[in-house]
Image (cartoon, rainbow, N blue to C red):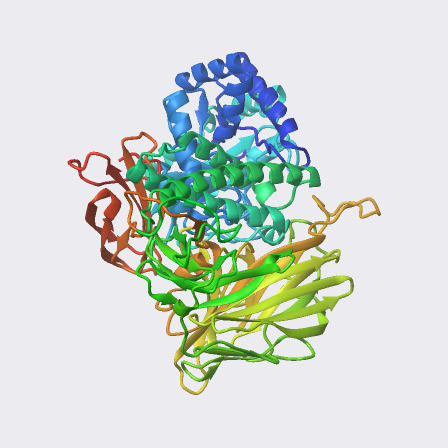
Amino acid sequence: MTQIGKIHLIGNAHLDPVWLWQWQEGYGEIKATFRSALDRLKEYPEFVFTRSCAAYYAWIEENAPDMFEEIKVRVAEGRWIIVGGWWIQPDCNLPSGESFARHGLYGQRYFQEKFGVMAKVGYNVDSFGHNGMLPQLLKKSGMDYYVFMRPEKHEKELDQNLFWWESEDGSRVLTFRLSDNYSTSWGTPFEDKVLNHGLMADADGHAHMTFYGVGNHGGGPTIGNLEVIQGLQEKFGKDRLVISTPNHYFAEIESTQPELPVLKDELQMHAVGCYSTHSESKENNRRAEHRLLNAEKFSSTANVLLGLKYPNEQLKVAWENVLFNQFHDIMGGCSIREAFQDARESYGEALHIAAKALNAATQRISWSIDTMKPEVRTLSKDKNWMSWEQGDLGTPFVVFNPLSWEVEVPVHANRKMSAVSDELGNPVPMQTVRASRTNGQDNWDTLFIARVPAMGYRVYWCYLTNESLSGSVDNPVIAEGHVLENEFLRVEFNANSGTIKRLVDKRTNTEVLDGPGAVPVVIDEYHSDTWGHGLHSYRELIGYFSDAEVKVLERGPLRGIIRVTSRYNGSTLRQDFTLHHHAAEVQVNVQLDWREKHKMLKLSFPVAVEQPESVSEIPYGFIRRETSGKEVPGQQWFDVYGQARGTGELRGLAILNTGKYAYDVMGSEARLTVVRSPIFADHYGERDDQVEYMDQGIQQFSYALVPHSGSWQESGIVRKGYELNVQPIGVWETYHEGPLSQLMEGIQIASVQVVATVFKQAEDGDGWILRCYETSGSSVETEIVVPLLNRSWHASFGKCEIKTFFIPSNSAHPVQEVNLIEYQ
């Protein structure tokens, strides 16, 4: 008889709530699948069922309460095992670090509240890749183990399928990669799969896991599955083939303490096309993540300062919408068209909830600022129908900064003003700019550069007619012909192609680019399915956007804009290259009207460095990657750096974005992936005239080019990525008394390496949560001060470490460090 190693047989039901069907069908399939699993538990006394995803249980609780009570009994018996600990099985590259924290926060707390247990095993068996910070995110969400399947063996070689996975901060989780798929509904016959895994286990010298049950559209373990198991157990013994759970498997492995390899890397790549499909959902995700964090910060501030009720339940609903839409087949862009219409509605609800909470908080704060002038006796709108200004006293405009450091940023006020001053009456330079409206002669707005404290606000005064306060700037921006220039950079455009001819860093007198930049490259991807299965890169160049029109759109002391419009077939690309007086970066606002099918658009930037290296933001961290041209996921920024020719000095170019998640670097050429247009949910199916293509029509996004000398850490690239994505919030006010001053700072963090992303009410109430992380990859000591709470403390951060602080409302109680689910 064949000698096999020990196999733990894991009864599961992989269930995509959305994929080739909409969520309503998934909702019903979850009920049927859970019912089937409960039936198996009655029929087979040794059977144990494993299930993840808090969202599914919430649906059962909502729609089938009697079945929910049955599940609670089975969980208590130890026969229904909760794994995963997250709201859903998300894409594990594209959500932000804070989204992963919220998966754990809402998932684990749901399981604890409803079942009295929390998951110990992280569980993403169908996600397409796994970012390198997950071990820390899992450990700090109460999970010590991890199970995944993709990338499979042919996509990433591993020393063993069982290993320690370690993130940059040193966190480790014991990790198992499935040797075969999670389902018995396709692929290798179940009996053969068990025997194959048994041979692997014997060769490796430790047990393996084999997953069984009908999957994808639910189903779970069948009567036939369990009859096969009984037959195999009679042949090989129940000590060799054990009906088990991931929890029992990992406990057994740890008890034997085998020598296992340690992996310090991300787990990639599978389905590289998923990081650029369906732009709208990816853009909505980025917007919703940031807006919710902004709403939490200022809702917390308004509660502390003014007693405004914190909208905890509403924000939780919004977060749950966002987390659900991060499911790997939604955020990965590989579902049917109707599913993305549902996602649009769900993101819309989340964005609107966040907008309402943010508006309520900022307007409660702005209304409570003392803006009264001695000359004002009563409010009367006599001077202008759009403004409450009396005489030449000005109108208060409150600018809020959600970020945890002071920012100097352009602010757009939707009025035409003659002057702007700060809260002390000091003139602030301004520029009249084109408005988005066309209302007779009223089509102009005002731009000024604001300096706003960290997680705080500042009042600026805007004047309709008081030109005596007008400020001026040294070294105004030049926008002439085909040139943009400020104190720091000079950008020259090719009049025919519309590409960047030269980008000069005037601070070092060096050329940033080694050839034309911002080149719109068109790639053929007819050979690719929606996922990009089997591909590692997209490099089949078939053309460029051309027929360019280059014109100066705006010139002024604070800002210059050159608009480049180019075309390819029926598609039009409009790029507004913008240079601000105060900043050493080029911001580009893009409008793309895309009409291509089975094609991809990238923007190419050859960076003028030797021995190039590349680094990219990943959730709450960063990763260095090879410069081999592979398509890879990223978040708000990626950077190409190396040695400057001739001098050997360290130089680089960071490329930031507001809603794109894919790029590639070949040598020193950096390419931002803008759009793909595969067929919806096309797994190499029949391509007839009835199919529909993604991303047809108009989309908008922004990117920025940040040249730097020295390292990306020294150049503050992490902060710049946030600044592009998190814009200041402006609120028009009028004259009134109030308890608040015209300038407020919300936080002080002494180290520039540490960024605070979260300030929210604690889930258990009676205190506040502040979450920070180290951004540069080196340990640091820092002081943290939260002035509105009258709190300060010292904190030590390891490299890339995430820390969560609970600040009790009672100031007599010390600040405590807690995990991501807000437990000590």
Residue 211, given in percent of the width and then of the height, sits at 54, 32
The number of discs equals 0
Quadrant containing the C terminus is top left
Question: Image height check: is 29 above or below 618?
Answer: above
Residue at image position (19%, 48%) is: 793
Snapshot quadrant of residue 821: top left
Locate residue 387 relative to residue 545 in the image: left or right. left
- Res. 399 in view: yes
Snapshot quadrant of residue 521: bottom right
Locate residue 518 relative to residue 489 in the image: left or right. right
Question: Image height check: is 146 above or below 619?
Answer: above
Question: Image height check: is 189 above or below 711?
Answer: above
Residue at image position (64%, 27%) is: 24
Query: Which residue of the protein is positioned furthest toward the right in this rendering?
Result: 689
Snapshot quadrant of residue 276: bottom right
Residue at image position (65%, 68%) is: 520
Residue 100, given in percent of the width and then of the height, sits at 44, 42
Residue 355, given in percent of the width and then of the height, sits at 49, 41
